[in-house]
Amino acid sequence: MKNIDELIKNNRTSIKPNWQELRFLETPRKQGKPRPTLYKQAKEDAVIIRLINEFPNIKHKTLTECIKTRRSLRQYSNVPFTFEELSYVMWETSRIDYHTDSATFRTIPTGGATNAMETYVMINNVEGMNPGVYHYIQDKHILALIDEEDSIQDRTNKALSQQLRGAAIVLILTAVPYRSEYKYSFTAHKMIAMEAGHSGQNASLVAENLDAGAVCLAAYNQLLLDELLKIDGVDEFATYAIPMGKK
Ligand SMILES: Cc1cc2nc3c(=O)[nH]c(=O)nc-3n(C[C@H](O)[C@H](O)[C@H](O)COP(=O)(O)O)c2cc1C
């Protein structure tokens, strides 16, 4: 049996790291270890879907309007997302703008531009697409198929602790912690969680612009969600799930 008081104390420590200690620590970077890759690519034999990056049919509300109307949405109509709307969500929340050898610049801020995040999307109700789970390739604006077996909706719902609720899509964010640990060691983990929050907020506001809504979920089943994405749960694991659908 875990000592809960001890667990709480340790977890608090991870969101108030002592940055002064970092200066004296032999981080993997200071040890000259190889630099981690900036972001993942698709597997060579993956089925690829090219998203679009022009959005003539998306109307544009003001930022003020989007912020004013944002509320967590947990009930969705059965109106599907169009392919353009899916493309728009991925473009605004998850793409890379540019990168150098050691820094990645995205639509969201990431700690020291280390971008310890990948994005996956579960397609549930999108015009012209079968339900499936895809990995978003950040620099190419493409989707790489992970799985589209018949049980994918049921498995997603279980992995989300029954919170799929007919959403059109579900964004699932993962952490690849070493990208940040390489430079920031024990101070990385607070920043990794915060990156997910930034992405969640972008996703929530983008949903408002589509007359849709989103809810950011932390209370999912870690094991089942990692299994759904076919990631190992150690060097990469889910940190946030964001179902999104029309009002
Ligand atoms: C980190 C985080 C985790 C959350 N996890 C869940 C969740 O697992 N299930 C859920 O229904 N809502 C979840 N929410 C949504 C909150 O319940 C919601 O933001 C809060 O009730 C305030 O409502 P509002 O978003 O409409 O302002 C989460 C929100 C945050 C920021």
Image (tube, rainbow, N blue to C red):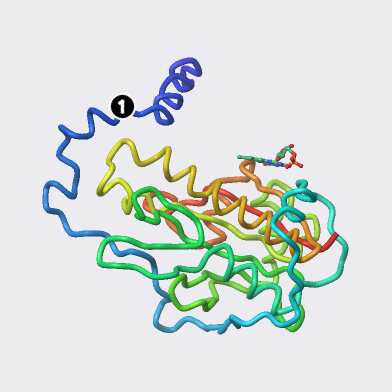
**In-front residue for pair 82/54:** 54
User: In the rendered image of this protein, does residue 6 appear above or below residue 172?
Assistant: above
Image point 60% across, 83% down: which residue? 52
- Residue 139 drawn at (x, y percent): 43, 74
* In the displayed structure image, the side of residue 166 where residue 10 appears, left or right: left
Quadrant housing the C terminus: bottom right
User: In the rendered image of this protein, does residue 206 appear above or below residue 5?
Assistant: below
Find numbered disc 1 in the image and state the secondary structure of the residue it sits on.
Answer: loop
Q: Check disc 1 and report the residue beneath it.
A: 18
Image point 42% across, 37% down: which residue? 190
Image quarter for ligand 1 equals top right
- Residue 85 drawn at (x, y percent): 71, 74
**In-front residue for pair 67/43:** 67
- Residue 64 drawn at (x, y percent): 72, 53
* In the displayed structure image, the side of residue 165 where residue 180 appears, left or right: left
Q: Amino acid at mark 1?
A: Asn
Confirm if mark 1 falls within 8 A of ligand 1.
no
Image point 48% across, 21% down: which residue? 8
**In-front residue for pair 70/134:** 70
* In the displayed structure image, the side of residue 45 where residue 152 appears, left or right: right
User: In the rendered image of this protein, does residue 1 appear above or below residue 60?
Assistant: above
Q: Quadrant of residue 186?
A: top left
- Residue 77 drawn at (x, y percent): 88, 62
